Image (cartoon, grey):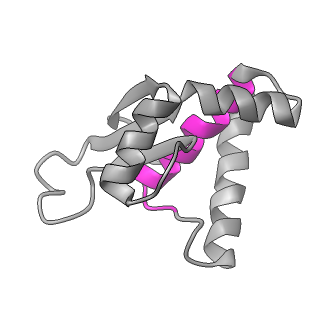
Amino acid sequence: MDCPDGELSLLVVDDPQIAKLNKKYLNRNGPTNVIAFPMRQGEFANLTPQLLGDVVISVETAAREAKKSGISMQERFTQLLVHGVLHLFGYDHEENKQQARKMEEKSNELIKLIET
């Protein structure tokens, strides 16, 4: 990602905690699997360019998704962490299919790097 000194915080929470964040910051009801809070955007982005932002993962949702997909919790957690980090770098999957495809390709590339 060309950011060797990048710094982020990771918060692992349960469903009620991520549901509160989801409602407060995204105005969405209920729990979700991952939320990213980018710090490299907005008017103060240049103050600390190495600070990427925060990634919040619901361990309960991740566990349910792993079980449903037939993968390990570790694998699902890694997928969600990569997904959150990509959001910190400005990747988006909700705007259009082309951006979603680009994000998925980058996610697969990074996960392969982690696995090797």
Residue 96 position, x and y percent, is 62, 78
Q: Which residues are magenta?
A: 74-91
Count of picture labels: 0
Q: Is residue 80 found inside the magenta-colored segment of the image?
A: yes
Place of residue 98 in the rendered image (x, y in percent of width and height, measured from the top left): 67, 77
Q: Relative to residue 71, is residue 18 drawn left or right?
A: left
Q: Which quadrant of the view contains residue 80? A: top right
**Nearer-the-camera pick, 92 or 73:** 73
Most foreground residue, 24 or 2: 24
Q: Is residue 47 magenta?
A: no
Q: Is residue 35 visible?
A: yes
Image position, residue 93 (x, y; %): 59, 65
Instruction: Give the main secondary structure, helix, strand or loop, of the magenta stretch.
Output: helix
Which quadrant, please, contains the C terminus? top right
Residue at 40 percent across and 28 percent down: it is 10
Tell me where residue 90 sits by quadrant: bottom left
Residue shown at 71%/67% (left/top)? 101
Say which of 62 and 53 sits in front.
Answer: 62
Q: Is residue 77 above or below residue 107?
A: above
